[in-house]
Image: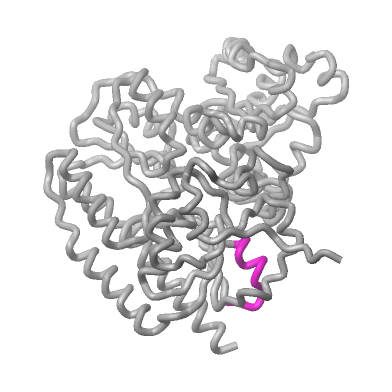
Amino acid sequence: MEERKPYAITVQDLVERGRDNIPAELITSTHLIYNSPAALAFNSPGAQGFGVKRAGLAIPGSVMLLVGPGCCGRNTTILSEMGGYSDRFFFYIMDETDIVTGRHLKKIPQAVEEVIEALPQPPSMVMICMTCVDALLGTDMERVCRKAEKAVGLPVVPCYMYALTREGRKPPMVDVRRAVYSLLEKQPRHRRTVNLLGYFAPLQDDCELYDLLRAMGFKEINEISRCPDFAAYKAMSQANFNLILNPESRLAAQDMEKRLGIPSIEITRLYQVAQIHKQYQALAKVLGADIDDTPWQEKAQATVAAMREKYAGTTVAIGEMQDGNAFEMALALTRYGFVVREIYANLGPDDFVYLRHLAVLSPETEVYSNLSPSMLYYEGTDHAVDITIGKDAAYYHDGAAHVHWDQDIQPFGYAGVIALLEAMDQALAERKKA
């Protein structure tokens, strides 16, 4: 009987193939989807964390009407039990007649009216979340929302929970970011105001980015997650520029530049201390300012040195269900003295900037696809590891120390590096005691 094994390929082999020849097993649109991350997040990534449904409620005072079959609403009931969401989710459950005839489209404005009437005070706006059913029906949801908006006298905006668009130009988590900023209207811009775009929860309070921006003269640093009310949200249109922290916010930033005249600058989350320093210097150059990040850089370097001395040679497996790019994180930890045995993540052309360096330092690191059905045969016996990062990696290596690293509050910059290494230190110490 032929032995069945999960698909895996070394970093070295990936680099030799090149970014234009990524194996089909690592491309989601080319094969059957197994999707262990979704299974670990109960049915759908949107059922917890910041999927489309929760992200669509980022606007202060907003409520959401989910329009779809009962199976789509079931996941949302899990989310609605989280603190602060139980009175913000409402459902229009489509039946067979709705799906066949499109009858529900005429009823949505009435449903929005009933939602508003049921609330003790009017919401700031209503987000209507649509599912794959309306994608297949070809529904013009913008038109439906305009009709509902006219009926209730409040902003009504669509967002799309369409798995079918995941491989397109506007995947669900990209388009929902555009939707949540779509109500901003053009205002006079303030020179000393900046918006941070990228996440639906704030950066960690001790992130040095806040201090660095203030040192450059920015008095107002806006994040949608820190807006106390709808007025503060609307004031985001006064920003002098948007600082993009996550590539999924590029479309939102482009839309804001087109509609509001707000330009953008992009930086990214990194775990390599040297690259964080270079990125801050590049940001300063673009802004025509000086950045002295020495105190934070030295603190991060000291943390790295202490971890290298304590844990050099410690083996690691890294998944994609965590706050970071798995390949960049693997490169950072390899440079810090860890041995990265396995990576579980989808691969894109942009990841080769990290893979090329990783292939030099750790060519035998193996890359697995969470979306490959062959992962059903994964046993984790070939490469025992000491610690995992990400809930998916933890699933594959039950006996290792675990750092899930998927909290709402977002790690970033030097503070993010320190927090990750401290979490790893704590997990390894607890495993040693056990």
Q: How many marks?
A: 0
Residue found at x 61% / y 77%:
384
Which residue reaches farthest bottom?
Answer: 433
Q: Tell whether position 394 is magenta.
A: yes
**In the displayed structure image, the side of residue 62 where residue 106 appears, left or right:** right
Q: Locate the N terminus and report the quarter of the image it occupies.
A: bottom right
**In the displayed structure image, the side of residue 163 where residue 265 appears, left or right:** left
Q: Is residue 64 above or below residue 359?
A: above
In the rendered image, is residue 222 in sight? no
Q: Is residue 76 above or below residue 82?
A: above
| Residue 272: image location, x then y, percent | 33, 61
Residue found at x 38% / y 30%:
253
Boundaries of the magenta span: 391-400
Q: Is residue 76 above or below residue 327?
A: above
Determine the main secondary structure of the stretch shown in magenta: helix
Q: Locate the C terminus and report the quarter of the image it occupies.
A: bottom right
Q: Is residue 295 above or below residue 115?
A: below
Q: Tell whether position 212 is magenta.
A: no
Q: Nearer the viewer, residue 388 or 106?
A: 388
Q: Nearer the viewer, residue 97 or 135?
A: 135
| Residue 332: image location, x then y, percent | 38, 64
In the rendered image, is residue 184 in sight? yes
Q: Quadrant of residue 343?
A: bottom right
**In the displayed structure image, the side of residue 24 where residue 288 appears, left or right:** left
Q: Nearer the viewer, residue 323 or 88?
A: 323
